[in-house]
Structure formats: structure tokens, C-alpha cells
Image (cartoon, rainbow, N blue to C red):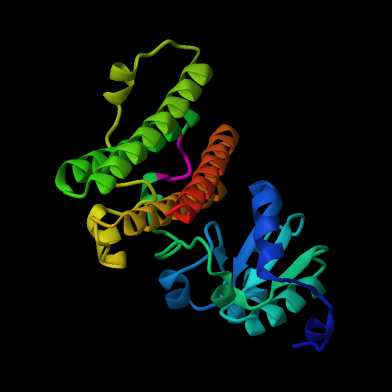
Amino acid sequence: MRWKQFLTPVKSLDVAQAREYVQKKPPDELTLLDVRQPNEYEAGHIPGARLIPLPDILSRLDEIDSNKTTVVYCAVGGRSRVAAQMIAAQGFSEVYNLSGGFKAWKGEAAFGAEEKGLELFTGNESVEETLVVAYSLEEGLRSFYLEMQAKVKNSNARNLFKKLSEIEVKHQERVLEEYRKITASSITREEFEKKVVVSTLEGGLTTEEYTTLFHPDWESVTDIIEVAMSIEAQALDLYLRASERSDEPQSQKVLRQIADEERTHLAQLGKLIETI
């Protein structure tokens, strides 16, 4: 291994800078690169991050777009600095190391392997099929919130579940409107919902998987919002990963638009939890 690979200087971003960068940079202009091991990635990662463990970097360089800005992170910043130096030495023009790594991130996180949920998006779907899957995922989450609204006893929790279900309806309306625009049709909601076939929640996990992950108190408003934020982070991650996989430009564009909406929804939930 050449020493130059370790001597190429790279800049670092602290967590605040990195978060601002991720929020402002369009997904098609940014690669978030996780260089930890697969089990670390599965336990928690920044939504939309691509996993290439440090030992595999040089053999898998062709999987990273050198024209995009690359932000590299690991657990605390050591491995990612080495990886960033190696990447920069290969001619990547804009590479940053995330200081403090995932441990310092302390923000929205997604869980599971890189392929988690991607069985819903093969990468070959038409834009119409992509929108049907997206609507279906929103419907799964809306149904879950309505089910929980009927189960909980705490009135504040019931009201929150009602509010969350209404937000999902708005998301569905935007998906349906996009479908109408693309197909130049006036399909009704009832007709469109006949196409819904997915029973998984938004983000690609089932209700049981979310419950196992977080063990929430469903009567606690704080716990409910935290789970909702986790679901939105998982959805953001899934849509970004699916957009990278898609070979259909229109589908890519739609998936990135939906991801942006999930990011906005995450910010709204963050503000909501601050008021409690």
C-alpha cells in the first residue's frame, strides 16, 4: 500500500456542519459513506449511507461516484479519516471526514442491513409502480396509527396518533397527485387504492420490528413521537437507498422527492417533541 494514500490531506466536518451539509446538499450530489463493519451498520447508521468497510475501500472504489461530494464516517472518526485519505488519493476532489463519527451524530438513525426493505424496490420499477409502493407504505403506517389511536387510553396519546395518521393522509395525497400528473389521469383515491399491495410500514419494517427495537410505552407522548421519528428516519433511508438502486430516471427523481418530504417531516416531529 502506498504511503501517499495516508498522506493526502482531507478536511473534517463536525456534526453540526455535517448535518447542515446533508440537509442542504441534493442526494444526487452527495455520498454518505459508512466504513464500519456490517454489524455496526445494522445496529444504526445515518439515513442514506452506503456501507463499504474500510478493508474493502480500494477494491470497491468503482461503487463510489467521484463526481459527488463524499462524507466519510465510522464509529468515532479514526477509520473514516484513513478511508477519506485513501479516497482522496485516488483523485476524488471533494472528500470530508466526519469528526466524532456516528457516536457523535446523535441524530436521526436507520437500522438494519443495506438490503433491508429493498425487496419492495427492485430498481426496475416504472415511476408509476414506484408511486404505488410509496403510497402503500404510507397506508401501512396510517393504518397502524389509527389502530393505536383506538387502543391507547391516554387522551393525549390518542390525539397524537390521530394527528400522525392525518399527516400520512397528506403524504398519500401528494403521492396520488404525482401519479395523476405523470399518468395524465384523473384516477380516484378508491381506484388507486386497489393497487395497494404492501403491508409493511414506511421504512420497510413491520410493527413488531419497530416495537422490538424501541420497546415504547404507547401511552407516552414522548415515546410515540420518538418512534414516529425513527420510522421517518427509516423511511428516509429506504427511499434514498432505493433511489440509488433505481435504473429509471423518473423513479429516481420521485424517490428523492419523497425522501426530501420525509426529511421535512422529521424536522417537524423534532420541533413537536421540543414542545413537550
* 20 sits to left or right of 147: right
- Can the viewer see residue 63? no
Which residue is the extreme one toward the top? 186
Foreground of the two, 71 or 164 = 164
* 194 sits to left or right of 236: left
- Can the viewer see residue 116? yes
Q: Main secondary structure of the magenta part?
A: loop
Foreground of the two, 118 or 238 = 238
Quadrant that contains the N terminus? bottom right
Q: Residue 105: percent from the left, percent from the top?
A: 57, 70
**Residue 165, above or below 206:** above
Residue drawn at x 27%, y 35% as measured from the top left: 197
Foreground of the two, 220 or 115 = 220
Q: Residue 216: percent from the left, percent from the top?
A: 27, 62
Quadrant that contains the C terminus? bottom left
Q: Is residue 120 magenta?
A: no
Q: Residue 32: percent from the left, percent from the top?
A: 63, 62
Foreground of the two, 152 or 91 = 152
Q: Residue 149: percent from the left, percent from the top?
A: 22, 42
Residue drawn at x 42%, y 77% as measured from the top left: 39
**Residue 145, above or below 209:** above
Task: Please tell me how many numbered marks the rendered image carries.
Answer: 0
Highlighted range, magenta: 121-125
Residue drawn at x 45%, y 54% as measured from the top left: 273
Quarter holding residue 211? bottom left
Quarter holding residue 248? top right
